[in-house]
Image (cartoon, rainbow, N blue to C red):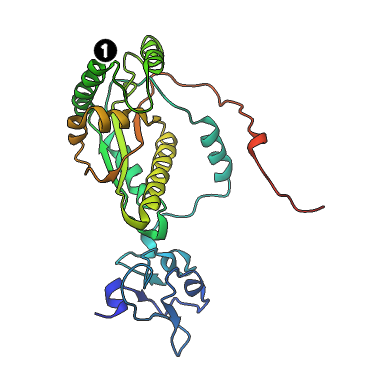
Amino acid sequence: MGAEQKTHFKLDRSKCIKCGKCINTCSGMVLVLDKDGFPKMKEFERFGWRGCWKCQHCLAVCPQGAISIFNKKADDSLPLPPLEMGSYMERLVVNRRSCRRYLNQNVDPQIISRILDAMAAAPTGGNSCNVEYTVIDDKDRVKEIWRLAYSKMESDAKRHVYTHSFNDFYYGKMKESEKTVRKNDLLFCGAPHLFIAHEKCSGKWAEGSKVNCNLATAYFELLANAFGLGTIIMSYPAEVLHELAPKARQMLNIPADHYMKLIVGFGYPEITYARGVQKDRHRNVHRFTQES
């Protein structure tokens, strides 16, 4: 099977203006000019480093919408964000925060679907796209997992047995927070839904797999906030599921050899905020400006 058949690469010559942008943005460098000056795809060994990266840059960059690939058409792509999006993104980042109190109700499934559809474009090293997303979007299912994990966590704590990052002091502080901020739930903070980015982590790309998962977690959190949801990125519950309550982890159907260090709890917030905070981290910014 030829390269253009494998990728379903198609060019509408009646639209192509021979600008060459597709060739200059092709990550796999598999696009070249034919004898008439039109882009074509040369043969390649396999997808990835030895061929097409499946990045769809050629489809996205074409100003005339002349290219389709993988049966994706230019007309079906979302339009670019408006110029004022920078201001909105600034507000989103400044106003996002950890939400530790949620309404006891499921989020509209259509909102979750829109977020997950957008997550298909979250970046991965080498455009591997191997990160898997596990979403528990039913609050009753989350409650089942919570009961099993929470009871095991509590019984172990009575024997002063904790995850590797906890001890009597930290656990005591978390228990104290259940009286106010965590609404009787130090584990999931009462979040009705859970999102977990995970990927098989082995071999020379193991560290890259971890980065991919962490990037996906950050993207999901920002998207959820953009849709008006509350979120909290949690590492302690992942420790509990892995170290103390493996039976609860099994309920997630996440393979044991998958990296799973962060869990995002999300849902409709019980408490809304009136404004963003005013953090100052200039001391941590090392900026090399242009010489005047």
Q: Residue 77: name its quadrant.
A: bottom left
Q: Residue 150: name its quadrant.
A: top left
- Residue at position x 30%, y 48% from top? 199
Residue 34 screen position, x and y as percent: 43, 86
Badge 1 marks a residue whose secondary structure is helix
Residue 164 screen position, x and y as percent: 35, 28
Residue 201 screen position, x and y as percent: 31, 49
Residue 86 screen position, x and y as percent: 57, 44
With respect to residue 109, does 52 lie above or below? below
Closer to the camera in the image, 172 or 189:
172
Task: Give the crowd class for mark 1: few <14, some 14-19, many >=20 residues within 10 Å.
Answer: few
Quadrant of the rendering where the N terminus is positioned: bottom left
From the viewer's perspective, is 65 left or right of 252? right
Q: Which residue is mark 1?
A: 158
- Residue at position x 57%, y 38% from top? 90
- Amino acid type at circle 1 is Lys
Considering every residue shown, the one lying at the far right of the view is: 292
Closer to the camera in the image, 132 or 94:
132
Residue 107 at least partly seen:
no
* Count of numbered circles on the image: 1
With respect to residue 183, does 94 lie above or below? below
Residue 280 at least partly seen:
yes
